[in-house]
Amino acid sequence: MSAPVRVLIPVGFGFNCEDETAAAFRMVGAEVDLVHLTDLFAGRAPRPIPGYQVLALVGGFSYGDHVASGFVAATRIRAHLEAELAALLAGGGRVLGICNGFQVLVRLGLLPGPEAGPADFLPRAALVGNDRLGYRDAWVRLGADPGSTCVF
């Protein structure tokens, strides 16, 4: 029997839905560690980041997002954890960004990442305001891209 997949979910500073995300990963047999970003920055996680197979950045409004969506979280993560994230990715680890976590990954330069080679943490996309005011509640059809290398 193989060892369970280890998942790291950073928490704190306005992130939310970490409990639901952890529950979903546990439902499929993963071991999940929820670790405050401050502890990650200080190296106080149960294991080094490259010791996980998945890093899941959850939703919310990290650092209030009053500067720009995901910008402050991405800047702090890059400053403190870039080498560990690069090692996680180089070792075949996966990163999932949900809602605000997606915004953080775009600001980190991991979505989209480089066409080839290791992660270089250079942003290649911009996040801009919506083309209309307010929220939109509508059904959207999604489909898998057969040419994508994404495992999710």
Image (cartoon, rainbow, N blue to C red):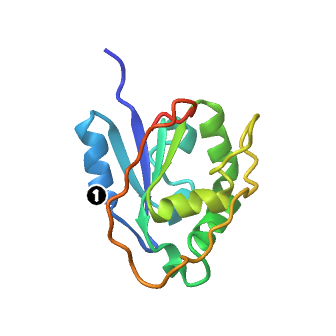
Above or below 136: residue 140:
above
Horizontal and vertical percent position of residue 28: 27, 35
Q: Is residue 98 visible?
A: yes
* Residue toward you, 34 or 102: 102
Q: Is residue 41 visible?
A: no
Query: How many marks overall?
Result: 1
Q: x, y percentage for residue 76? A: 64, 67
Type of amino acid under label 1: Asp
- Residue at left 48%, top 65%? 100
* Placement of the C terminus among the 4 image quadrants: top left
Q: Position of residue 43 (x, y in %)?
A: 56, 54
Left or right, residue 17 beside residue 61: left
Q: Residue at left 36%, top 23%?
A: 3
In the visual, does 139 lie left or right of 115? left
Query: Tag 1, which secondary structure?
Result: helix
Query: Which residue is more in the foreground, 149 or 52?
Result: 149
Q: Quadrant of residue 106?
A: bottom right
At a point 43% along the width and 74% down the height, the residue shown is 14
In the rendered image, which residue does mark 1 sit on?
19
Q: Position of residue 22 (x, y in %)?
A: 31, 50
Residue 40 to residue 73: above or below = above
Q: Is residue 130 left or right of residue 58?
A: right
Which of the image's four quarters has the N terminus? top left
Tell me if residue 123 comes above or below residue 52 in the rendering.
Answer: below
Q: Crowding at label 1, few (<14), some or many (≥20) Cα neighbours within 10 Å? A: few
Name which residue lies at 52% across and 66% down: 38
